[in-house]
């Protein structure tokens, strides 16, 4: 675990009170970022922040919280809400997101009994829908396949490749640099934002494998030896 690092950008998480957002908050804090856990309720955000700080006292100093608008003022912003709230929550904070790197980790899925099925949101992916809602942000799709539990176990590496895509190559590089500092993770540049559709939909397959094999899978691709 690293000390707070003033060279690292602050990161706000909209919907940061759920398992994915809070796991990511802990992981980002563990590599030196100051994180703002956002919520529709600042009290719920405080509760989530306190749970993390109690569990991981070493990173407590780097964890802050507030409503989603407060989190959207951070230098980089992650959208960690369910798919059907992602574009709306981004649009509500659009003024704060202009020109910023915004990361969408939301997957459009439905569970029918024991089966996970991908949904096709407007514009083909949640990420594209968010980009359309806030045209001035630099949208990057990432983190879709990292299980929340493993994200939150910050004393352990996560053995996974992380597919990163977006239409702004510099923004993709910024997010890939963050991923590369997660122990065990390897960022892979998966192309333009149009590929978010396939990345998001593939999550249904991974969740189905979890059910079938009673585990939590994460992707690891072969054949790329030097991803630089
Ligand atoms: N769980 C995982 O392992 C995992 C891994 C990778 C990616 N993801 C993706 O990350 C996203 C979050 O996953 P999660 O499991 O943490 O989801 P979640 O618990 O269902 O939702 C996360 C947070 O989003 C806020 N929220 C809920 N409905 C909303 C709405 N309609 N509008 C605005 N905000 C809303 C809530 O926060 P407040 O009530 O505090 O506002 C909630 O705590 C999902 O899109 C998921 O596909 C999940």
Image (tube, helix red, strand yellow):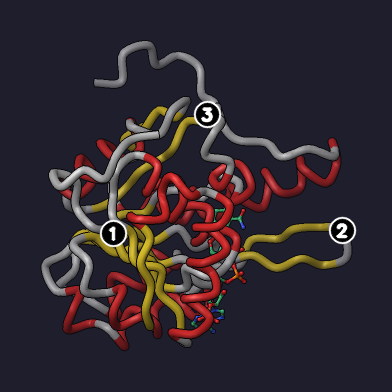
Q: Which residue is mark 1?
A: 11
For marks 1 and 2, the one nearer the N-term is 1
Give me the residue at 47% from left, 25% from top.
Answer: 184
Instruction: From the top left corner, tell me how far across and down residue 74 is, in percent.
Output: 22, 67
Q: Which residue is mark 3?
A: 157
Along the viewing direction, whichever of 202 and 53 lies nearer the viewer: 53
Give me the residue at 76% from left, 65% from top.
Answer: 111
Neighbours of disc 3 within 10 Å: few (<14), some (14-19), many (20+): some
Instruction: From the top left corner, tell me how far across and down residue 163 is, in percent.
Output: 42, 39
Give me the residue at 23% from left, 57% from top.
Answer: 10
Q: Is residue 30 above or below residue 39?
A: above
Along the viewing direction, whichever of 116 and 98 lies nearer the viewer: 98
Give me the residue at 77% from left, 43% from top.
Answer: 210
**How far apart in space, not on screen, are marks 1 and 2 (Cα)?**
35 Å
Q: Is residue 207 above or below residue 75?
A: above
SS class, disc 3: loop
**How far apart in space, not on screen, are marks 1 and 3 (Cα)?**
21 Å
Residue 198 visible to an observer of this rendering: no
Q: Is residue 179 left or right of residue 120?
A: left
């Amino acid at each position: 675990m690293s000390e707070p690092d003033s060279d690292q950008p602050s990161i706000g998480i909209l919907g940061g009170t759920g398992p994915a957002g809070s796991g990511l908050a802990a992981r980002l804090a563990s590599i030196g970022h100051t994180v703002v856990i956002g919520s529709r309720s600042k009290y719920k955000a405080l509760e989530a922040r306190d749970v993390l700080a109690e569990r991981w006292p070493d990173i407590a100093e780097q964890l802050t919280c507030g409503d989603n608008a407060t989190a959207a003022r951070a230098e980089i912003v992650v959208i960690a809400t369910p798919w059907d709230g992602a574009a709306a929550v981004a649009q509500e904070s659009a003024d704060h997101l202009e020109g910023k790197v915004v990361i969408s980790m939301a997957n459009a899925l439905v569970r029918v009994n024991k089966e996970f099925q991908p949904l096709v949101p407007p514009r083909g992916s949640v990420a594209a829908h968010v980009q359309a809602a806030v045209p001035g942000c630099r949208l990057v799709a990432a983190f879709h396949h990292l299980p929340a539990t493993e994200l939150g176990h910050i004393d352990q590496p996560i053995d996974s490749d992380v597919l990163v895509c977006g239409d702004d190559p510099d923004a993709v590089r910024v997010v890939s640099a963050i991923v590369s500092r997660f122990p065990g993770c390897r960022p892979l540049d998966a192309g333009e934002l149009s590929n978010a559709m396939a990345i998001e939909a593939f999550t249904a397959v991974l969740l189905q494998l979890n059910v079938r094999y009673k585990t939590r899978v994460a992707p690891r691709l072969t054949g790329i030896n030097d991803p630089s």
